[in-house]
Amino acid sequence: MLITPPYHCGVVESAGRWPNLGFIYIGGELEKHGYEVELYDAMSKFHTHEQIREHIRESKPHVVGVTAITATVNDAVKVLETAKSELPEVTTVIGGVHPTFMYEELLNNAPDTVDYCIIGEGELTLPDLLNTLNKGKDPVTVQGIAYLRSGTPFRTPPRPLIEDLDSLSPAWHLANWSDYPLYFMDHSHVAILSSSRGCIHECSFCSQHKFWQGSYRHRDPEKFVGEIEHLNSVYGINVFFIADEYPTRDRARWIRILDLLIGKSMDIHILLETCVTDILRDKDIIQKYREAGVLFIYLGVESTNNRRLEEFKKETKFEDSKTALKIVRDAGMIVESSLILGMPDETPETVKETLKLAKEYNADYMHFLLIAPWPYADMYPDLKDYIEEWDYSRYNLVEPILKPEKMTRDELMKEVLNCYKNYYMGKMPEWASMKGNDLKKSCLIRGMKAIMENSFLKDHMKGLGGMPKGVLKMMEKLSDN
Ligand code: B12
């Protein structure tokens, strides 16, 4: 049983619910080896730990695997504790970016709960581990795991990255598709799928370059688009979220994907994340993105300040990002972006300056995030001394973890909430008067409604006196139309 832990911090999830792609892949490989697999998405089902207990008690799995990023690791471990207490013989496994780097801490802190940490990719490692254990052999031969050996965390040699991503067989049939709608689009069913793995950029606050060991592997365009066609025709999936850090890296391959999608003329929408530099590069073919079904692009511009961009090791400057965001917006797509605030030298003035320049960026949706110091990120040594919050479940980019030198964390949070309030008050009249793109208009307005109803902002805004009544009324009126 592969369980997505029931963690919620109300940002991305306020827009919809999403399958766990890693588990779809791992499930497929386990089935190839003859294992019976259940995917239990406790997160998307909004199950409590008590409901998870009941489900484990009823299903009686032999092995329970959980996935964990830093924010979700506490809930992931709690799920394994439940499994051990219900089924003392169960084998427990944890994988994902957090265990990959923090296996020592995990094994030391939860020696009776976590049997095995999976380091890196799980598709080949989990079947290998289970086959080895089933044969009664010593797991020391299994590459890419860590476990307690004579009470001490022990890591086996790394497993080489999977060479051919198209050799994997994602088990789409294991997903319960009715769990995955987008809240801002009627009759939507969402899949997350992958056309590549890895990122070549080394942003100092991020984990992904390290997680994929600086590698970049991509799938064959025909097979990738074939998968979209399969999901559309067999399961009625009409919204595809590309999970890649960097799907557009190779222009020729990306154009091939877009052309294939255009050729298939499916009634689908594509959401993706990419880099400012690629949008600048693809200015001449940006309409092709739209024709292929791309509705939404996330560009993590991360700052409005060139000095900060250098510190983050972003390879872009303010003006580049501004141009890229405009290119996407002008092409009729929704462009979402984020800025990272709360660094040690942040002050109320620098936050206000960021807000002012964020309006120049003018993304349709802008997130004012707070730096989360992943303990394995390059930037961690510079941030460590400013940490006031050690509970990983708050490392979700929306709660203040660091105390800047000249602000308290409460003051920082207040400034950030003011950014949201101020930014979106300006957006609403713009959306109200938007003409000629009904799909974009309706998604923006309904998406904002979902954010206001479901996201972390809802409760916080109350403390700030809420959104002005006029804005709420406008929102209601717009979403009724
Ligand atoms: C899709 C996605 C989501 C989905 C998750 C859907 C789901 N049901 O899991 C949604 C939109 C809900 C989401 C939300 C959030 N996300 Co997110 N998300 C991603 C994204 C874009 C892709 C993840 C993915 O599918 N990767 C592809 C698969 C194949 O890789 P994988 O998940 O790592 O799994 C492989 C291995 O890790 C391993 N593995 C993983 N788990 C397990 C378990 C077992 C048992 C085994 C054997 C192996 C194993 O095997 C898998 C196959 O090889 C990544 C960025 C990226 N491009 O990777 C961010 C990312 C994972 N998210 C991130 C964050 C911070 C969040 C939020 C906190 C943001 C927010 N404030 O809303 C929330 C947390 C909400 C939550 N409840 O989890 C960060 C995590 C950073 C960190 N180091 O902790 C990332 C890396 C983005 C970033 N660049 O910072 N996210």
Image: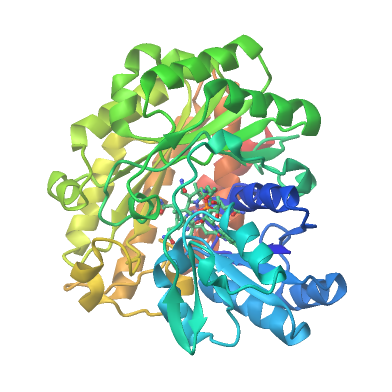
How many callouts does the rendering have? 0
Relative to residue 219, is residue 301 depicted above or below? below
Visual colour scheme: rainbow
Return the x and y of residue 471 as percentages of the image width and height: 51, 46
Q: Quadrant of residue 365?
A: top left
Relative to residue 91, is residue 209 depicted above or below? above
- Viewer can see residue 419: yes
Return the x and y of residue 419 as percentages of the image width and height: 35, 53
Viewer-side residue, 164 vs 11: 164
The residue drawn where x is 21% and y is 78% is 385
Q: Quadrant of residue 168?
A: top right
Looking at the rendered image, the quarter that the C terminus falls into is top right
Return the x and y of residue 282 as percentages of the image width and height: 34, 19
Return the x and y of residue 231 as percentages of the image width and height: 72, 31
The residue drawn where x is 20% and y is 48% is 313
On the picture, is 461 further left or further right than 174? left
Q: Residue furthest right?
A: 58
The residue drawn where x is 63% and y is 72% is 137
Viewer-side residue, 438 vs 151: 151
On the picture, is 188 further left or further right than 36? left
Relative to residue 398, is residue 237 depicted above or below? above
Q: Residue furthest left?
A: 307
The residue drawn where x is 52% and y is 33% is 195
Viewer-side residue, 162 vs 293: 162
- Viewer can see residue 5: no
Relative to residue 258, is residue 365 depicted above or below? below
On the picture, is 256 further left or further right than 355? right
Looking at the rendered image, the quarter that the N terminus falls into is bottom right
